[in-house]
Amino acid sequence: MTETNAAQAGPEPEATLLSAFDVSVQFGGLRAVDQVSLTVRRGEIVGLIGPNGAGKTTFFQAISGFVKMAGGIVRFCGERIDGLAPERICRLGMTRTFQIVEVFPSLTVRETLTAAAMVRLPLARARELAEDVASLVRLGGKLDLTCRQLTLPDQKALEIGKAMATQPTMILLDEVMAGLRPSETDEVVALIRTLRDRGVTFLVVEHNMDVIMGLSDRVAVMGSGRKIMEGTPDEVVRDPKVIEIYLGGEFELA
Ligand SMILES: Nc1ncnc2c1ncn2[C@@H]1O[C@H](COP(=O)(O)OP(=O)(O)OP(=O)(O)O)[C@@H](O)[C@H]1O
Ligand SMILES: [Mg+2]
């Protein structure tokens, strides 16, 4: 990436936490993410939607350092982070959950959260933070259960807890609500709102339209690797291009 490109990305307003500029990812002959730009301000909840295979997860992987970008610039808290390893990016304050719940089944909730907290803290303080985070995500009474003993909603809470234990400024959530019943989904939505009120910024991929439209301050839409549009939830559900993508699909735009 050249400095000329960096200059084109332009100066950022104070409130900008994440800015991705022209991010591309190439898998062999497939351009999975094609020049996607997206800005997230501090304290926002931004939704990212699009049909299966649109490139949402790959975009997350690119900005969090898990896949190599074919091009583009990513700034987080004013620093260039493109090309950095995921651990470095996580220590700078951006963390992500995985679309497939990733827990070690034989570890306890306490061990899992402590391990995540050790990204920043020595063991003794990581253990303390693990307890605080467990209470925050309503797993305070389940600290000594193993992950395989947890229900699906509790596993999802643990995913969010693992992210919180790294003391992030921003969390990327990839379909954390998939597979949950409506009442369980409501609980996760309430948890995300609580964490936002405590200062965490969110970029959220979710297929449930009611959830994403109710939760997000702004929504960006991807299709075939490209960003198709972004706007307020109201603007997005009325956009002809978005309606066309979803028409006849599995989604209903209320
Ligand atoms: N590691 C990989 N190697 C090759 N192709 C990949 C890889 N990961 C994803 N892809 C392809 O890249 C495209 C984008 O996939 P991605 O998983 O980012 O979509 P998505 O929007 O997250 O979809 P979903 O809603 O189903 O999770 C798809 O065509 C997918 O098959
Ligand atoms: Mg995905």
Image (spheres, grey):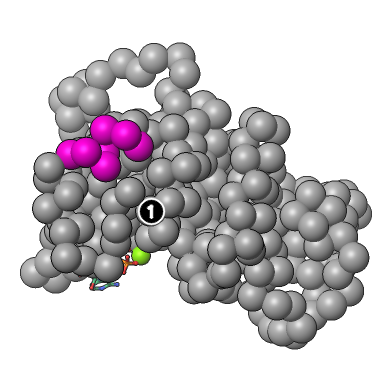
> In this picture, which residue range is highlighted in magenta?
233-239
Place residue 103 in its image quadrant.
bottom right
Residue at 66% x, 69% y is 153
Q: Amino acid at mark 1?
A: Met
Residue 229 percent location from the top left of the image: 20, 38
Q: Is residue 138 visible?
A: yes
26 to the left or right of 76:
left
186 to the left or right of 76:
right
Q: Name the quarter where the N terminus is drawn.
A: top left
Residue at 20% x, 58% y is 246
Residue at 79% x, 80% y is 146
Q: Is residue 1 visible?
A: no
Place residue 167 in its image quadrant.
top right
Residue 231 percent location from the top left of the image: 29, 32
206 to the left or right of 111:
left
Residue 11 percent location from the top left of the image: 31, 16
Q: Nearer the viewer, residue 152 or 5?
A: 152
Looking at the image, the residue that sits furthest to the front is 254
